[in-house]
Image: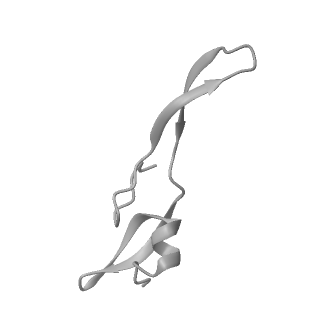
Amino acid sequence: MAKHCEICGKVGVVGSNISHAHNVTKRTWEPNLQRVRAKVGEENKRIWVCTRCLRSGKVKKA
């Protein structure tokens, strides 16, 4: 799966899980991406878009 939004460019971030015993391990937070058919220029394409862009109307669905 693509790891970035093709509209706003949102990408995942990395950080740490910290347990009660203070054991530290790496983890990631990925954006909520959906594969949608959208109008790009004059043609319809399948692109990866975050739900924030879908909800705000930045994407014109085909």
How many marks on residues?
A: 0
In front here: 45 or 9? 9
In front here: 15 or 48? 15
User: Does 59 sit above or below residue 48?
Assistant: below
Q: Quadrant of residue 57?
A: bottom left
**Residue visible at 24% across and 86% down in the picture:** 42
User: Does 35 sit above or below residue 28?
Assistant: below
Q: Quadrant of the C terminus?
A: bottom left
**Residue visible at 45% across and 71% down in the picture:** 53
Q: Pinpoint residue 23: horizontal percent, then vertical percent.
A: 65, 14
**Residue visible at 40% across and 78% down in the picture:** 59
Q: Quadrant of residue 10?
A: bottom left
Residue 54 placement, left or right of 10: right
Q: Pinpoint residue 24: horizontal percent, then vertical percent.
A: 60, 17
- Give the residue furthest to the right: 20
Q: Pinpoint residue 20: horizontal percent, then vertical percent.
A: 75, 19
In front here: 15 or 43? 15
Q: Pinpoint residue 39: horizontal percent, then vertical percent.
A: 34, 82
